[in-house]
Amino acid sequence: MKILVINGPNLNLLGKREPGIYGVKTLDEINGLLKKRAGELGLEIVFSQSNSEGTLIDFIQANSPQASGIIINPGALTHYGLSLRDALADASIPVIEVHISNIYAREEWRAKSVIAPIARQISGLGWRGYLLAMETLAAEILKGASQ
């Protein structure tokens, strides 16, 4: 089972960018923790991060046919990335949207997600939200495979 883990704009700056909001772990550190847990769960995991919406869409289109699920932190594209939303919907596989901070407890404009209608969401659990998303997808995919 392959899971795609996608991170949008500015998430390459984790660990340096507003650590009081986003924590001190870098994206590489988070990816390392995910890779370790994926191995324990018997999952293959493929990572992508870009500051460009088009690059993220290209990644989804190229990789989703061989994937069982997507974990995405769309960053600022959460609020206006309609073409990203469409690419995720077109993938026709489960999507979990992850946010390190609680987007509903911050500025009003952050509380609107164009991705939410086609995904489930984990918000405000820090980097652990990624692990929860992966464990959730793994459990659901394994359950579906055994039915």
Image (tube, rainbow, N blue to C red):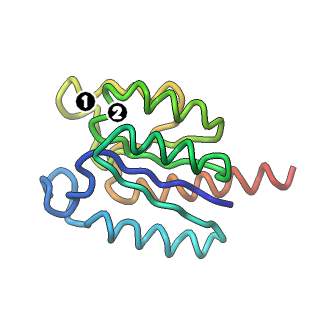
Nearer the observer: mark 1 or 2; the answer is: 2
139 in relation to 28, above or below: above
Q: Amino acid at mark 2?
A: Thr
Count up the numbered dots.
Answer: 2
Numbered disc 1: secondary structure: helix
Vertical arrangement, residue 147 with respect to residue 114, above or below: below
Circle 1 packing at 10 Å, graded few (<14), some (14-19), many (20+), is some
- Location of residue 138 in the rendering, given as x and y in whole percent from the top left corner: 64, 57
- Mark 1 near mark 2, Cβ–Cβ under 8 Å? yes
Q: Out of 66 and 21, give the one closest to the viewer.
A: 66
Which label sits on residue 110? 1
The answer to which quarter of the image holds residue 24 is: bottom left
Name the spot of residue 40 as percent of width and height, x first: 60, 75
What residue sits right under mark 2 in the picture? 78
Q: Residue 142: percent from the left, percent from the top?
A: 74, 57
Residue at the image position 60 percent from the left and 31 percent from the top? 90
Amino acid of disc 1: Arg
Q: Secondary structure at mark 2?
A: helix
Residue at 22% from the left image edge and 59% from the top image edge: 14
Please name the residue shown 46% across and 67% down the image: 34
Above or below — where is 23 with respect to 122? below
For marks 1 and 2, give the CA distance.
8 Å
| Quadrant housing residue 79 | top left
